[in-house]
Amino acid sequence: MVMETIVHCGPISRASIAKQTGLSKQTISEIARQLEEDGWIRETGRTSGHVGRTAITYEIVPDAACIATIDLGGRKLRAAIADLACNVLAEVTEPTDTRGGRFVVEQIARLARRAAEHNDIAFDKVRLAIIGVPGAPDRTTGRVLMAPNIPGLDAFDVRAALAELLGTEVILENDVNLAVIGEHWAGSATGTDDLAYVAIGTGIGAGVMVGGELVRGAANAAGELGFLPLGADPFEPASLKVGALERATATAGIRARYSTLTGKDADVPAIFAAAAVGEAEASQVLDETARHLALTIAVLSAVTNPGRIILGGSIGSRMELVERIRALLPLCSPTQVEIGVSALGSRVTLIGGAAIGLAHLHAALFSGGVPGAQINLPPAKVATTGLVPAPAAGFGS
């Protein structure tokens, strides 16, 4: 209770803490003394502008303990550090190692350390790492299943390998699950407890929240939209590996459809650019993609009835696609749902990881062993310094 109050309201005096928590001033003084001696809070000065004696004010020591939050994408890997004051510091990024497997695990560990170094954080202050992965983490074996865009993660205990390399506790979570948590905590869906985040890029997936609770499913695979039987033949062997919908609507599917229509090879940004100048084939590809996605959202609406669906990812956040989906959805679904674009952009998974990690860290440090105890986090304060690219690597598309 005391730490939650200081995190939300610091700098704050002991008298104000007592008033807000209902604890006695004597109890607050003892707790504050212990927290200060242990290095979790510090004096910031004295109150001013009041009649009578001034009082010492306290704030949390932000970097007394931190978490690493990592977003593992099929093409990019991002890492950032978040501190106890809910500051999500500047991130570092580089292209994901195409060799996959243990090469990617080693890359994650290296980039996490680089993120701490870039933000002048000693890595021994990092107590926990949250890894957002594009698949279904198996909580028993530590493997990552259903991640076709990064080979080899289903062949060994990814969680244990990362914990050994980082020297800290590791939590694996689906990347779009973290994204929906990030939007709920600090994005465009704050206060909306029934929502979904749909990411379309190298792959397609959804994080779903019902009644403010994340829906994970029996095998942690809820929201694997790529395997919906839409867009391509779900009985073809390729659909069992990648997913029928993903084959049609994600990066590879869009490029393949455009190549079929034109005989030309183009990346996705070039296809959007061609549609913008009126090329019929490019516009047809976007129209078909939007149709598949409108049907996908209709399925989500029928099953979970979200009040808001947020689109993200390098493809899903394109307004040319969003507007097409908005126009098509009323034609295939009677359920009204608000369709928006992520307010957090490429950082949404990192911010969701910070939410999970900081709640876990605060509970571990300050709950006194009370099961389930955790603080209500204030909104994240996200660094606006932008990406810090790897010294000799590009960003990719």
Image (spheres, rainbow, N blue to C red):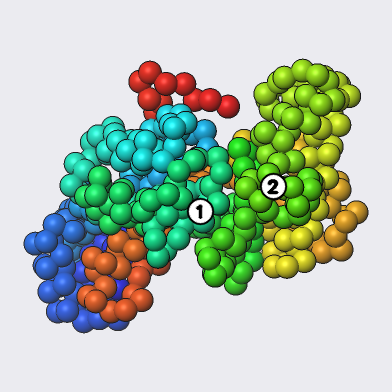
Q: Estimate how packed mark 1 is, as few (under 14), some (14 to 19) or many (20 or more) residues with alpha carbons within 10 Å.
A: many
From the viewer's perspective, is the residue at label 1 or at label 2 nearer?
Answer: 2
Image x and y of residue 22, in percent: 30, 81
The answer to whether one can see residue 229 in this image is yes
Q: Which secondary structure, mark 1? A: strand
Mark 2 is on which residue type? Answer: Pro
Name the residue nearer the viewer: 166 or 140.
140
Dividing the image into 4 quarters, which one contains the C terminus?
Answer: top right
Q: Residue at x 23, y 72 (%)?
A: 15
Asked if residue 68 is positioned above or below residue 333 in the image, the reply reads above
On residue 237, the disc is 2
Left/right placement of residue 196 relative to residue 323 reads: left
Residue at image mark 1? 145
Name the residue nearer the viewer: 56 or 77.
77
Task: Return the residue found at the far front.
Answer: 237
Q: Residue at x 16, y 68 (%)?
A: 32
